[in-house]
Each structure stands twice: as structure tokens, then as C-alpha cells.
């Protein structure tokens, strides 16, 4: 079974990122001399006052974890789902300063698992500190929120981990693990059967955010993770659930235009087989209903397995766009194809103008013209593929969610 590359491969990219950061630091103002070797972590608080000479001021408290890497001469800063890496310089008075501008998010307004929406942040133009013999940290900072003092103590609190995923019970699903402070290595998931799933550091936040590799997981597997700790060795705690179940296998269909397909499907799709229903060809077609009201984000709407022959390179099918109101189709629907352990191909389809009336189970619908779809198979597809349709949704940041995507009628599903 093909799974993700080994942790050694994944970790290589994680380490290289830090190494590159260390190699671009610029000229030291004085020779580098740190109070210790290796890495140490600190819980840091910056008390920033706007317009300190004015009568009316605003005080902002910026709290974050800082990993001081004495050997690489860098600092890794992280808080509230965002991280940054900066080079360090030693100043003429023996202190240390951030060479690069660093942005740190303020306290999150929502749970860690509700990620993706903008949060207020502080951008430091100056950050200078010393570390005393007892391990305490003091200094000064200047930012877009004001200027003030910096204090820090050794990090004795573990990170909090949250998981955000796009959909449920789906071997295609994309999910991320988010930490409240920097982690030294990506989390590793293990399934009930012993399969290893090694997460990949996100390019945006490589020390705080880790994503599932873009591969299709096996069916019926539960993935769990444990043993995560921060740079100081403090064990992590979990907010909400941390793990994933890939669900039961969907139906295996023959390339006969759904003529032998059972009447019951997963995820709410239905088989059209009654007289007067808008069947594309033969005696049966599959209908994915248009979503009305506010759609669930990343909801799976259809999943079917299909055997493929050696040499097959494309998936083809006939389809008609289905709507209930003129607003259907605000969001796109995404189609996904993959084999277990292999890469995933995603595609969207053009919608046809819905002008033909029809009725299914007493529901009035409008149909588009019959169109043909062609989607390339993954290069590593073998044996059978999973074909699925997913509602992409609008994300978590919109207050007023528009209507969901148009539906679709599918027929003549086959590979060539």
C-alpha cells in the first residue's frame, strides 16, 4: 500500500527551513556569544503603550512563546496559530535583537479549532532582550501598537493542539493540526492497522501548523496521535478531538450507466429510476441535490468506487446541472479522484444554464443541458478509484453565508 514518504523525508524539509533561516542573518554587530548552547524556550510578555507621552494611552499585552536557538542564532516565535522565524544579533551592550520584523497574533477570539479567520496582531519593528543567569528575560520592544517593556520566564507550559478538517469520514479529507506554540517536529498519526501518516509543515506557519499529505487514505481506519511536546519538552494537551476516521467504503459501481446500482447511496445522493424523472440515459441516473440555505463547509455529497483497467487515463460521464432557485451555484463543487495510498486529482465542472423544468419526489427543479465531463485520472491510480463530489463552502469567516452550490445529475460514469 502506498502511503506518505518516511518521516526522515518530511523532517528534512522541516530542518532545512531552519537551516536556511540561520544562513541569512547578515553581519553581527559584535561577535556572537550566547549564555548557553542549544535551544531554550521562554514565555514572553510585551507590554506596549501607545503614545507614552500623551495624556490618553492604550496598553496592549502581546504574549507568545519564543524559542532561542543559540547554535543557529535564530528565534522561533509563535502564538495563537501563527509563527515566525527571525535571525538574532548580539548588540554592543551584550543584549540580543531581532534582525527581522516579526508579527505575532494577539489572543484569539475563538477556539483554536475554529481557524482560518483573521485575528489582530502586533508587528515588532524593534525587539531587544537580555537573558540573566537565573534564566529570566527582560528587554524593550517597539511595534505598530506602541512601545514598552519585555519580560519572560522559562517555558513550563505545554502547547494546546487543535484539529481542523474539511468534512467527515472521508479518505480524501484534508486536515490540519494547529499548535499554540512552536513544535520541534511534525506530528505523526498511526492507524489501527499500523499505517503511519506523517504530517507536513505548512509553508505559512511551519512550526505551528501541520497538514495531511495530499494522498487518499485507506477506508475504515482510525488515525490517532500522541507523544507531542514543545521545544522545552512540555507535553501537549488537546482541545477537542485529535484523530480521524476514514469511514466505510462507498458502493463499487459497474461501468454500466448505474443500471445495476442499488437504490441507496451515502451522503444524500439518490438514484433516479421512476417514470417521469429526468434520467439522462437508460433506466437510472444519480442525482446530487442542490443545497438550499447555508451549506456545511466541505461536505461530501457523493462517493462511488469504480474499477479501472491498466492503461485507463481519464474518467468520463454525462451530467446536467440542477438548481432550485436562481441563486444556486454561488459556491463551486469540487470533484476528486484517487486510489488508496495515491495522489488526488481535483476538478471543477462548468454549470449549464438551468432552463428546463423537472420534478423529483415532488420537488420542483430546473435542469441544464446534457454536458460531457472528462477528468484526468491520477498518474498512480491502480485497481480502483474513488470518485467523489464535495461542497467547498465559503470558509468560517463570512457572517452571512450565501446559498450553496447547484446540484447535478450524473450518468454513464466510466474510465477509458
Image: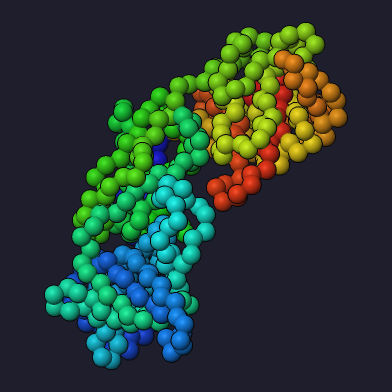
Which residue lies at the image location 25% right of the left edge and 72% below the top edge? 152
Which residue lies at the image location 56% right of the left edge and 51% below the top edge? 397
Residue 284's place in the image compared with 233, above or below, is above
Which residue lies at the image location 19% right of the left edge and 74% below the top edge? 136
> Residue farthest to the front?
55
Seen in the image, is 100 located left or right of residue 271? left
Residue 192's place in the image compared with 63, above or below, is above
The image position of residue 203, as x and y in percent, is 46, 58
Q: Nearest the camera: 151 or 368? A: 151
Residue 259 visible in the current orientation: yes
Q: Quadrant of residue 352?
A: top right
The image position of residue 416, as x and y in percent, is 66, 25
The image position of residue 281, as x and y in percent, is 77, 15
Q: Nearest the camera: 18 or 320? A: 320
Residue 108's place in the image compared with 217, above or below, is below
Residue 143 visible in the current orientation: no
> Residue farthest to the bottom?
92
The image position of residue 410, as x and y in percent, is 70, 23
Q: Quadrant of residue 180?
A: bottom left
Q: Nearest the camera: 373 or 93? A: 93
Seen in the image, is 136 located left or right of residue 315? left
Which residue lies at the image location 17% right of the left edge and 73% below the top edge? 135
Q: Where's the N terminus, which quadrant?
A: top left
Seen in the image, is 304 located left or right of residue 165? right
Amino acid at each position: 500500500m502506498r502511503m506518505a514518504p518516511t518521516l526522515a523525508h518530511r523532517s528534512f524539509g522541516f530542518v532545512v527551513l531552519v537551516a536556511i533561516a540561520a544562513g541569512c542573518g547578515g553581519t553581527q554587530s559584535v561577535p556572537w556569544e550566547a549564555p548557553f548552547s542549544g535551544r531554550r524556550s521562554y514565555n514572553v510578555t510585551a507590554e506596549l503603550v501607545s503614545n507614552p507621552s500623551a495624556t490618553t494611552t492604550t496598553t496592549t499585552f502581546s504574549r507568545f512563546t519564543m524559542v532561542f536557538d543559540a547554535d543557529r542564532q535564530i528565534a522561533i516565535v509563535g502564538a495563537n496559530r501563527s509563527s515566525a522565524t527571525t535571525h538574532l544579533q548580539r548588540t554592543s551592550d551584550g543584549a540580543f535583537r531581532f534582525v527581522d520584523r516579526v508579527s505575532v497574533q494577539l489572543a484569539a477570539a475563538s477556539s483554536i479549532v475554529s481557524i482560518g479567520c483573521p485575528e489582530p496582531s502586533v508587528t515588532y519593528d524593534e525587539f531587544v532582550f537580555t537573558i540573566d543567569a537565573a534564566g529570566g528575560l527582560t528587554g524593550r520592544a517597539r511595534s505598530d501598537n506602541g512601545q514598552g517593556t519585555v519580560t519572560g520566564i522559562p517555558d513550563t507550559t505545554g502547547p494546546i493542539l487543535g484539529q481542523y478538517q474539511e468534512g467527515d469520514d472521508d479518505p480524501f479529507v484534508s486536515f490540519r493540526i494547529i499548535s499554540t506554540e512552536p513544535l520541534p517536529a511534525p506530528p505523526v498519526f498511526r492507524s489501527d492497522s499500523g499505517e503511519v501518516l506523517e504530517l507536513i509543515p505548512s509553508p505559512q506557519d511551519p512550526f505551528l501548523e501541520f497538514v495531511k499529505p495530499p494522498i487518499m487514505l485507506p477506508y475504515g481506519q482510525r488515525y490517532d496521535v500522541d507523544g507531542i511536546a514543545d521545544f522545552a519538552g512540555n507535553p501537549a494537551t488537546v482541545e477537542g478531538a485529535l484523530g480521524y476516521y476514514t469511514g466505510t467504503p462507498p458502493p463499487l459501481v459497474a461501468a454500466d450507466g448505474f443500471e445495476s446500482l442499488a437504490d441507496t447511496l451515502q451522503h444524500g445522493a439518490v438514484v433516479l429510476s421512476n417514470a417521469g424523472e429526468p434520467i439522462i440515459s437508460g433506466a437510472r441516473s444519480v442525482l446530487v441535490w442542490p443545497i438550499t440555505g447555508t451549506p456545511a463547509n466541505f461536505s461530501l455529497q457523493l462517493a462511488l468506487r469504480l474499477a479501472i483497467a491498466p492503461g485507463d487515463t481519464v474518467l468520463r460521464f454525462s451530467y446536467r446541472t440542477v438548481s432550485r432557485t436562481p441563486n444556486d451555484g454561488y459556491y463551486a463543487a469540487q470533484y476528486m479522484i484517487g486510489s488508496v495510498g495515491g495522489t488526488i486529482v481535483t476538478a471543477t465542472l462548468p454549470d449549464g444554464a438551468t432552463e428546463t423544468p423537472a420534478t423529483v419526489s415532488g420537488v420542483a427543479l430546473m435542469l441544464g443541458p446534457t454536458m460531457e465531463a472528462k477528468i484526468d485520472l491520477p498518474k498512480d491510480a491502480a485497481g480502483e478509484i474513488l470518485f467523489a463530489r464535495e461542497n467547498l463552502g465559503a470558509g468560517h469567516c463570512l457572517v452571512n453565508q450565501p446559498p450553496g452550490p447547484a446540484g447535478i445529475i450524473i450518468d454513464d460514469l466510466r474510465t477509458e
